[in-house]
Image (spheres, coloured by chain):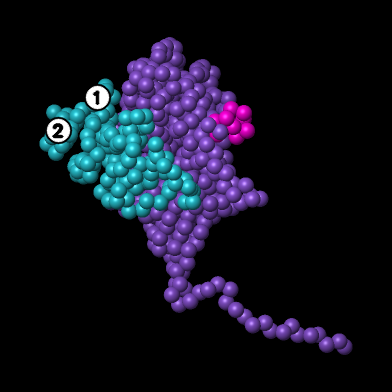
Chain colours: A purple, B cyan
């Protein structure tokens, strides 16, 4: 019998240089590109054991320079550009943009267009909040509710597709009104779907309220103090979850919101559970608003676009309550065909900053749901692509005129 | 007396000759011009009045320099009231005091403008790149 040679024992060396000083603290990098992240962002978490001590966030991995691009396009071309800032809240972006141009040009849009804009905005909010609820449920491991919520989300996407022909980029808004009308048959079809959605939202809210496991995973987790929330000016559902009662739909009414009756949903605790409650409560309100707009559309006739003359020089500040919060557009016109300056301040830009405060003191396992709780939208926040040749490892600098040449030649 | 009249009175008292109402529109938006040296005082005053610094924009005005616009939101006090403070900076050396220590929400806004417009915010506690890569080569403004 052949003897099996035992492998010689190698001298073990510690692979990482961990000494007493650096042992308690580690940096856990998540991103910029990571299988658990959907978009390019880089979280640096300083942890001790399982507790996060400090968090830092780096953005700009897919910066698109949309605000600069807008200066080189006409007011009409920009509608298509701003539609593509973000896929989830495309209607909010075009509403904010067209509304700001209308403020510049003193254009009054017809009533029918106002109701259609409000309807689309609310349907988009329903779809965005359901998307969020699904993602959140999946991250805490509640796959059943995730699938049920996303099944119901298909109903609202069907409605949007029937109205606009698209599930995401609806291309409904135009300067002076909307591009497509909604006829009587369509209204009755949407009403049927809204009934289904109402039932679905009530069921989802009940499930979240009553389930002890969701409470255990979200109550007291990722808490944002009201004081900090006020200091960093968080917006939208994140602000309302800490008890700050702000809503652009009420504070700075646009479209048909000044006449629509609805409640601003707030919660007190500022934790992930409160954020879920606020969003689910808003779903029920959104279905109500959508129904109100449909009722009004039955009785309001007339055109859907107003006549648009040239845009005089000046500046305007338009705001919209996007699903994630206040969206701010600031346009400067010099009287020419193109805006002289376009500034877009997206809601995620303010809410992502809140993450750095929310992640402090959390368990590492609660980081994914905490990050998802503010519904971060990197597409919104990043709006330069650095070209690096992988083979030579050299950075290539591209000038602005080269870049626009590449865009014209459709190479980029 | 509307909320804006109260604010205008307080701002005038603070700024005296540096206060200049540029224009206002029917949407309850007010645009006020002032000097760069007063930005800290203005921010402190407007935050004490429970305003919110929601965004900072910058306009490239060509040879005239840069216009910084600090958007303060008062719409939670009076419907759709927003106050924009305009500050002109020279093109050669655009420097202004950072207001991040007073208004935390200015942190990312100032870092963004440092990246994209080359404006220097003196005294910013964390002047790293936000959108540009950390290794981005610095270049002259002008």
Q: Chain of mark 2?
A: B
User: Which residue is painted at 25% across and 28% down in the image?
Assistant: B30
Label 1 secondary element: strand
User: Which residue is painted at 55% across and 72% down in the image?
Assistant: A16
Mark toward the viewer: 1 or 2: 2
Instruction: Classify A288 as above or below A1.
Output: above
Q: Are marks 1 and 2 on the same chain?
A: yes
* Magenta stretch contains residue A405: yes
Dot 1 or dot 2, earlier in sequence: 2
Provide residue A211's location: percent of width, then percent of height: 46, 53
In the image: residue B139, left or right of residue A143 = left
Quarter of the N terminus of chain B within the rendering: top left
Instruction: Classify A122 as above or below A379.
Output: above
Q: Chain of mark 1?
A: B
Camera-side residue: B42 or A244? Answer: B42
Q: Which residues are magenta?
A: A403-412
Marks 1 & 2, CB-CB < 8 Å contact: no
Q: Which residue is mark 1?
A: B23
User: Which residue is painted at 41% across and 34% down in the image?
Assistant: A344
């Amino acid at each position: 019998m052949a003897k099996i040679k035992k492998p010689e024992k190698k001298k073990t060396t510690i692979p990482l240089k961990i000494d007493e000083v650096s042992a308690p603290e580690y940096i856990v990098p998540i991103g910029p590109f990571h299988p658990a992240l959907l978009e390019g962002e880089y979280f640096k978490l300083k942890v001790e054991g399982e507790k996060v001590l400090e968090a830092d966030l780096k953005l700009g991995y897919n910066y698109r320079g949309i605000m600069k691009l807008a200066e080189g396009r006409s007011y009409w071309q920009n509608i298509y550009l701003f539609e593509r800032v973000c896929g989830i809240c495309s209607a909010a972006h075009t509403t904010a943009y067209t509304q700001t141009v209308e403020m510049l040009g003193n254009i009054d849009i017809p009533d029918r267009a106002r109701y259609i804009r409000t309807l689309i905005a609310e349907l988009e909010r329903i779809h965005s909040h359901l998307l969020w609820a699904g993602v959140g449920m999946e991250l805490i491991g509640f796959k059943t509710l995730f699938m049920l919520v996303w099944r119901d989300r298909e109903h609202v996407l069907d409605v949007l597709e029937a109205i606009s022909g698209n599930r995401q980029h609806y291309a409904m808004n135009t300067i002076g009104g909307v591009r497509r009308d909604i006829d009587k048959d369509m209204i009755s079809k949407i009403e049927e779907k809204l009934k289904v959605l109402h039932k679905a939202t009530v069921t989802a809210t009940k499930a979240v309220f009553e389930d002890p496991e969701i409470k255990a995973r979200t109550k007291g987790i990722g808490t944002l103090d009201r004081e900090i929330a006020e200091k960093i000016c968080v917006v939208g559902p994140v602000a309302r979850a800490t008890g700050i009662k702000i809503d652009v739909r009420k504070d700075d009414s646009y479209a048909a919101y000044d006449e629509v009756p609805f409640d601003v949903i707030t919660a007190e605790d500022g934790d992930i559970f409160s954020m879920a409650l606020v969003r689910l409560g808003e779903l029920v309100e959104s279905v109500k608003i959508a129904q109100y707009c449909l009722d009004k559309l039955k009785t309001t006739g007339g055109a859907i676009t107003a006549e648009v003359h040239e845009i005089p020089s000046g500046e305007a500040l338009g705001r919209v309550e996007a699903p994630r919060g206040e969206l701010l557009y600031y346009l400067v016109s010099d009287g020419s065909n193109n805006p002289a300056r376009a500034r877009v301040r997206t809601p995620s830009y303010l809410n992502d900053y809140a993450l750095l405060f929310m992640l402090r003191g959390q368990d590492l396992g609660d980081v994914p749901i905490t990050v998802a709780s503010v519904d971060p939208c990197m597409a919104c926040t990043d709006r330069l692509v650095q070209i690096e040749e992988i083979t030579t490892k050299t950075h290539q600098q591209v000038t602005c005129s080269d870049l626009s040449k590449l865009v014209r030649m459709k190479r980029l | 007396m509307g909320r804006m009249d109260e604010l205008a009175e307080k701002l005038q008292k603070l700024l005296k000759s540096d206060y200049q109402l540029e224009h206002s529109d029917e949407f309850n938006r007010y645009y006020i011009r002032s000097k760069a040296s007063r930005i800290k005082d203005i921010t402190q005053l407007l935050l004490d009045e429970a305003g919110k610094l929601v965004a900072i924009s910058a306009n490239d005005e060509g040879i005239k320099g840069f216009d910084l616009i600090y958007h303060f939101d008062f719409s939670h006090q009076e419907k759709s009231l927003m106050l924009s403070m305009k500050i002109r900076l020279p093109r050669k050396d655009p420097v202004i005091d950072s207001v991040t220590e007073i208004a935390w929400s200015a942190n990312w806004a100032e870092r963004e403008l440092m990246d994209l417009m080359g404006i220097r915010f003196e005294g910013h506690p964390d002047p790293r790149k936000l959108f540009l890569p950390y290794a981005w080569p610095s270049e002259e403004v002008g």
